[in-house]
Amino acid sequence: EAGVAQSPRYKIIEKRQSVAFWCNPISGHATLYWYQQILGQGPKLLIQFQNNGVVDDSQLPKDRFSAERLKGVDSTLKIQPAKLEDSAVYLCASSFLPGQGNNEQFFGPGTRLTVL
Amino acid sequence: AQSVTQLGSHVSVSEGALVLLRCNYSSSVPPYLFWYVQYPNQGLQLLLKYTSAATLVKGINGFEAEFKKSETSFHLTKPSAHMSDAAEYFCAVSDATRGGADGLTFGKGTHLIIQP
């Protein structure tokens, strides 16, 4: 079974530029999460989707971050404009809906963003 | 609101010695608790989880953890450390009243070092 796919794996940009990350969840997983992991810290939830609807985006900096999951499968996370403090690893995870499985979250390898 | 505290950002043990990684949680509702492992440049892998069944939970790679409600703890142990256990370990919590469907709240992580 294929895992959660993310691209690109690495990205270097200058501050004030924009960047986008892509995630393809495990087939059949209706719930998708984006986490931000700053160096030396644990991951922090940015946004959670169920199918193509947003369940929780309370920690998403909405002035610069946006995310979408148009067809309830792939998702894109965008930062515009980027700041130095956005340097982090962006992790995507997916799981079944509650009651459909053990709702374990499976994580992708992450995209490492460096903002110069 | 939920939070997780991992005591010790770095833990060093000798190969073959007991591994003990500490995790305390704060939650106003019944929690689900998780331990994840992260190897360099990889995503997170679930080691084990507590979902209100048995308080002693066995996971992969010989790890286990015990849920102690009176101490609000969920410490991770392994009787005999192996060189391959060297990694970053994260404790995480989610709201059990929502079936664990929420995003996870992670601790800051503990870097496990295995001395030969």
Image (cartoon, rainbow, N blue to C red):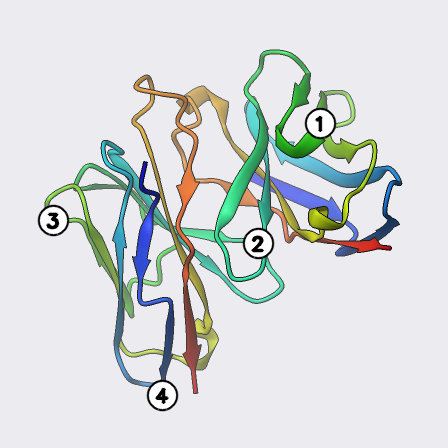
Q: Mark 1, mark 4: which one is toward the viewer?
A: 1
Element at badge 1?
strand
Q: How far from the left and from the top, in percent, is residue A73?
A: 18, 43
Q: Amino acid at mark 2?
A: Gly
- Under mark 1, the amino acid is Ala
Please tell me which of labels 3 and 4 falls first in the chain: 4
Callouts 3 and 4 in the same chain: yes
Separation (CA) of disc 3 from disc 4: 28 Å
Q: Is residue B61 found left or right of A78 in the rendered image? A: right
User: Helix or strand or loop: what does disc 3 sit on?
Assistant: loop
Q: Which residue does the image show at 24% across and 34% down from the upper left?
A: A30
Residue B16 visible in image: yes
- The x, y position of residue B12, in whole percent, is 84, 54
Q: CA distance from mark 1 to mark 4?
A: 43 Å
In the rendered structure, which amino acid carries the disc numbered 4? Glu
Q: How far apart are labels 4 and 2 at the CA level?
A: 25 Å
The amino acid at mark 3 is Leu
Give the crowd class for mark 2: few <14, some 14-19, many >=20 residues within 10 Å.
many
Count of marks, rendered view: 4
**Do pointers 4 and 2 mark residues of a single chain?**
yes
What number is the disc on residue A42?
A: 2
- What is the chain letter for disc 2? A
Earlier along the polypeptide chain: callout 3 or callout 2?
2
Q: Which mark is residue A70?
A: 3
Picture quadrant of residue B61:
top right
Q: Looking at the image, do the residues carrying marks 3 and 2 touch, with CB atoms under 8 Å apart?
A: no
Q: Quadrant of residue B51?
A: top right
| Residue for badge 4 | A14
